[in-house]
Image (spheres, rainbow, N blue to C red):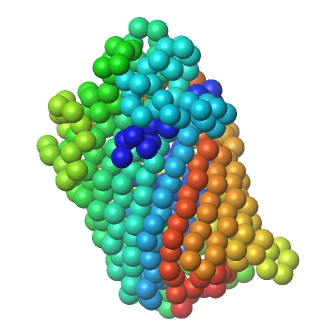
Amino acid sequence: MMTGLILTGLARQASAIPYSYPGIRYVSPYSHSMGGVTLPLTNETGNSLFNNPAGLAKNTKFRAEYLNLQFDVNSGVAGDMTQATKMFNLGTLTDVLNSDINYLYSGGIGNLTAVSWGGFAVGLLIQDRVRAYSDGTNVHYETNSLAVPALGYGFSLARGVVRLGYSLQLVNLASGTTQSTADSGARFLSGLSEGRGLAHTASVNFAFPFTYLPTLSLVARNIGGVTYAAGSLLPRANNPTGVPPTEEMTVDAAFGMMVRISGQVKSNWYLQYKDINNRVSVPFLEKMNLGLDISLSPAVGIRAGMTGNQFSAGLGYRSESSEINLAYYKDPTPFKDVSYYDTRFALQYKVLFQDQNSRNREEEGKPR
């Protein structure tokens, strides 16, 4: 619900992470900690379904992420959690905003439940993200609320060297960047466009049986474009002001490899380039994601990454039936009067079942 996600905070810095790109609707804290890399992370069912359906080809046995809850706040709330009780709606938040002119408050909450078997997968993404600041007279805010059921299928060719996949997403979106008077009548759900549209995603992965197990991934998002129609399976906006604009198709590519350090300690290196077909007007470096995941054991990993010149980091712990990931990363803002970069802290908690409960990426990378 919106009340949970408006636990937000003050921001001074952040960086261009994938939410600015059409079709990239799901980015986990696990991904954020590695600079926003999404394509090579095919060991995650939900991520494969939304970002790289060819990865579903590896899920020949039953896998499930029953709960994949994510929560993030920016640096103000992280430094003063006593403010959290005031962040239930924009009207309540305006007192805080007016006391910190031109300081951005932001946060988000979401859950992605996904199951797969035999290459097929179904999932449901529910996600809300908000941010706001006051210039002393008006409050400026951005809202992005998603409800996306999805289904997908992946299959292998050439003994697993080539994997292909497709997913279909019914996108229900309420979004907008607007302003209101800085008083108790302000609402995050006012002044938004709202609609529903079908999104098609297809990808191909190459897993080469060579030293370091190199992989290459290509994905096309929003194939044919996503045109929104009025209405939504989960209406969110108050008196919608039209439908969201059409989203164009974009193409992304990624390269990954595994390097063993010593014993069980392995490193996974990732390089991703978004928007090869140049549909998004951002600098070249901001389309680049660099990620490193060091597995100290099958249960513990530490991560780092870069998006452009912005640094991210995180760590994770995985047991037989659950997983926790923490991330520090940077997020872009649409507001010209405040800092472009928003420093954020994210927590991900997963309840899962998988046929392989240890994250052995060396074995998962090998062709079958």
Q: Residue at x 54, y 14 (%)?
A: 99
Q: Residue at x 75, y 75 (%)?
A: 297
Res. 299 image quadrant:
bottom right
Residue 322 appears in view: yes
47 vs 140, nearest the viewer: 140
Q: Which residue is drawn at 15% across and 46% down?
A: 231
312 vs 180, nearest the viewer: 180
Residue 343 appears in view: no
Residue 90 versus residue 180 in the image, above or below: below
Residue 304's x, y, as percent? 71, 54
Outermost residue, top side: 137
Q: Which residue is drawn at 62% across and 60% down?
A: 325
Query: Left or right: 106 with respect to 365?
Result: left
- Picture quarter with the C terminus: bottom right
Residue 97's x, y, as percent? 49, 19
Query: Left or right: 249 with respect to 238?
Result: right
Query: Left or right: 62 with respect to 289?
Result: left
Res. 182 image quadrant:
top left
Outermost residue, left side: 230
Residue 51 versus residue 225 in the image, above or below: below
Residue 229's x, y, as percent? 15, 46
Residue 180 versus residue 46 in the image, above or below: above
Tag count in the figure? 0
